[in-house]
Image (cartoon, grey):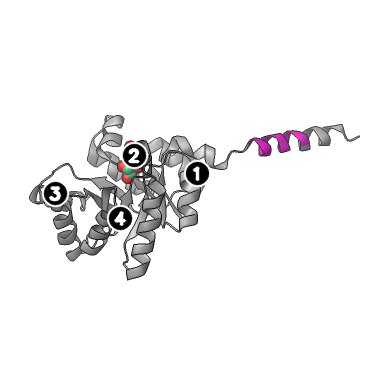
């Protein structure tokens, strides 16, 4: 399974990249706004740290505006991926970009039908939002399982990026379901490697070691 970092914080990306855990990065307008920095500069910095795909999202809601932004963003770095919302205009732009060989990440996917549409339109990646579905009482991970089955049934090349991950269970179940990628907020990462029994075990080994004559 590939791990993307779900952040626009360059320092966080640098720190975690040193652990060999970063295969790519996803950003969105909220994450970029949180940094209070220039969009292009942030994306270019991230793209120089991480060699894998770096998603940068368009702001336009009309296909023409999306495409104008997309062509500009695509020039920022060779590994940049254009993130587009799952709307009719977004699907149109996704298809147009696919025809030009520009990679896309179709975001805000909340149903299997939406994911199927994006895969058929030629999306490189689709991002189902598991946490936001759980928030409204719908099992987000079921969507991941369904999308995984659909993509494999028809042999689409589209890869699933499990997004809106809130806890370790989301990641573990997404991996068991066979999702290609999980995008993980930096703040959640330590909970993926930390375990109280590991800490207790180290303490015990060290105290036993200290007792030897
Ligand atoms: C990633 O592509 C998404 O933008 C992100 O995972 C959304 O997460 P949130 O629901 O926690 O904002």
- Label 4 sits on residue: 112
Disc 4 + disc 3, Cβ < 8 Å: no
Q: CA distance from mark 2 to mark 4?
A: 15 Å
- Label 3 sits on residue: 66
Q: Which residues are magenta?
A: 196-204
Q: Which mark is residue 132?
A: 2
Q: Nearer the viewer, mark 3 or mark 2?
A: 2
Q: Is residue 7 visible?
A: no
Disc 3 + disc 2, Cβ < 8 Å: no
Q: Is residue 177 visible?
A: yes
Q: CA distance from mark 4 to mark 3?
A: 24 Å
Residue drawn 41% across the image and 36% down it: 11
Q: Residue furthest right?
A: 213
For marks 1 and 2 on the same chain, the one whose residue lies earlier in the sequence: 2
Residue drawn 68% across the image and 38% down it: 197
For marks 2 and 4 on the same chain, the one whose residue lies earlier in the sequence: 4
- The local secondary structure at tag 1 comes to helix
For marks 1 and 3 on the same chain, the one whose residue lies earlier in the sequence: 3
State the image quarter where residue 28 is shown: top left
For marks 4 and 3 on the same chain, the one whose residue lies earlier in the sequence: 3
Q: Which mark is residue 169?
A: 1
- The local secondary structure at tag 3 comes to helix
| Nearest to the observer: residue 22 or residue 131 | 131
For marks 3 and 2 on the same chain, the one whose residue lies earlier in the sequence: 3
- How many residues crowd mark 4 within 10 Å: few (<14), some (14–19), many (20+)? some
- In the rendered image, residue 83, in percent from the top left (x then y), is placed at 24, 49
């Amino acid at each position: 399974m590939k791990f993307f970092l779900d952040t626009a914080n360059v320092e966080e990306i640098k720190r975690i990249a040193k652990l060999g855990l970063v295969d790519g990065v996803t950003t969105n307008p909220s994450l970029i706004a949180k940094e209070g920095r220039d969009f292009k500069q942030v994306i270019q910095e991230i793209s120089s740290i991480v060699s894998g795909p770096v998603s940068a999202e368009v702001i336009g809601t009309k296909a023409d505006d999306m495409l104008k932004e997309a062509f500009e963003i695509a020039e920022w770095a060779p590994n940049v991926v254009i993130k587009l919302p799952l709307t009719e205009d977004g699907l149109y732009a996704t298809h147009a970009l696919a025809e030009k060989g520009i990679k896309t990440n179709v975001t805000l996917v909340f149903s299997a039908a939406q994911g199927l549409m994006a895969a058929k339109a030629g999306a490189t990646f689709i991002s189902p939002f598991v946490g936001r579905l759980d928030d409204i009482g719908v099992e987000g991970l079921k969507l991941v399982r369904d999308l995984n089955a659909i993509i494999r049934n028809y042999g689409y090349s589209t890869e699933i990026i499990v997004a809106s991950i809130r806890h370790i269970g989301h990641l573990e179940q997404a991996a068991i379901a066979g999702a290609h990628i999980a995008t993980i907020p930096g703040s959640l990462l330590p909970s993926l490697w930390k375990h109280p029994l590991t800490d207790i075990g180290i303490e015990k080994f060290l105290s036993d070691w200290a007792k030897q004559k």
